[in-house]
Amino acid sequence: MSQPLRLAGKTVLVTAAGQGIGRASALAMAETGARVIATDVNADLLADLHHDAIETQVLDVLDDTAVQTTMNAKKPNVLFNCAGVVHHGTILDCTTDEWDFAFNLNVRAMFIATQAALPHMLEQGGGSIINMSSAVSSIIAAPNRFAYGASKAAVVGLTKSVAKDFVTQGIRCNAICPGTVESPSWHERVTALGEQLGSYDAALEQFVSRQPMGRVATADEIANLVVYLASDESAFTTGQTHVIDGGWAS
Ligand code: NAD
């Protein structure tokens, strides 16, 4: 007898599903039985995201009203807050505008989306919220990741707080903390460093050399963890930082 799909009956909303980890996760959750609302600010990136179980929608997570309207309409019982930005530089390089942007996109947008989705999850008797943090957060630091690390550490605090307050009401809230993951924006970061160092290969070597496994992750490897946290197989974990970094922070 065939097993029921792991995410059958789940309605999942993914932010930043146009590329990278968000896209891989949307596809993986659709493959495992969920109805997926794949959202992104960039319509072009959503245009070729095709799957019978995926509905796409343009959504800027910085638009509070649009986020609220979307949650009211879609009533997800799984929310994957994936949108985020990497700011490059130390504290001496960081302007207040860059700091504000990092915190608005990496943390405030997550607060608004979660606040909008949570009442619908409570009405349905439960839900799973998965927040994109990073190994570079409260776990470890990396060079030139000042605003990024600070904002991703705030995601850990936000996650634990939501988990604590709603643990008796069927809500789980977990953070995922990837190490370096191959994605379009990661390739842009390697290219930018390559321009400083005079060679793309030298930049690639610098990124890979800090990885104990000698490679970075694929987005599909992170998506597997997202599927697990979305599913009832992870029913006993909440408020945790799920580190998936190839041993970087070990
Ligand atoms: P990416 O950076 O290549 O793509 C980001 C996506 O976010 C794009 O599709 C973009 O259109 C979308 N986006 C940007 N602003 C948005 C907004 N205002 N509203 C909605 N969508 C918006 O993808 P990635 O590298 O897989 O990163 C995804 C998340 O994973 C980010 O939060 C990032 O910080 C985190 N992360 C990435 C890595 C890595 O090495 N790639 C490691 C740890 C954590």
Image (cartoon, grey):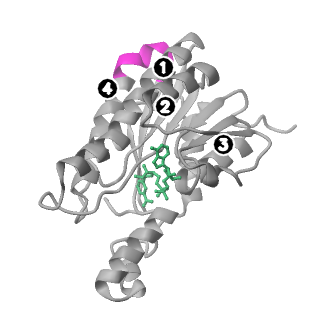
Q: Earlier in the sequence, mark 3 or mark 4?
A: 3
Q: CA distance from mark 1 to mark 2?
A: 9 Å
Which residue position holds label 2? Answer: 129
Q: Tell whether position 224 is magenta.
A: no
Considering the numbered disc 2 on the image, is that residue within a helix, a strand or a loop? strand
Q: Nearer the viewer, residue 225 or 148?
A: 148
Q: Earlier in the sequence, mark 2 or mark 4?
A: 2
Quarter occupied by the C terminus: bottom left
Residue at 34%, 38% (x, y): give it: 107
Which residue position holds label 3? Answer: 29
Left/right placement of residue 126 relative to residue 95 reads: right
For the image, the number of numbered tags is 4
Considering the numbered disc 3 on the image, is that residue within a helix, a strand or a loop? helix
Residue contact between numbered discs 1 and 2, judged by CB atoms under 8 Å: yes
**Residue type highlighted by circle 4:** Ser
Q: Tell whether position 167 is magenta.
A: yes
- Image: 153 above or below 220: above
Residue at 43%, 72% (x, y): give it: 213
Residue contact between numbered discs 3 and 2, judged by CB atoms under 8 Å: no
Q: CA distance from mark 3 to mark 1?
A: 20 Å
Left/right placement of residue 214 relative to residue 55 reads: left
Which corner quadrant of the image does residue 193 belong to?
bottom left
Please tell me the numbered disc located at residue 118. Answer: 1
Left/right placement of residue 117 relative to residue 161 reads: right
- Image: 56 above or below 118: below
Residue at 34%, 34% (x, y): give it: 108
Which residue position holds label 4? Answer: 161
**Residue type highlighted by circle 2:** Ile
**Residue type highlighted by circle 3:** Met
Which corner quadrant of the image does residue 204 belong to?
bottom left
Tell me which segment is drawn in magenta.
Answer: 164-171
One can see residue 239 in this view? no
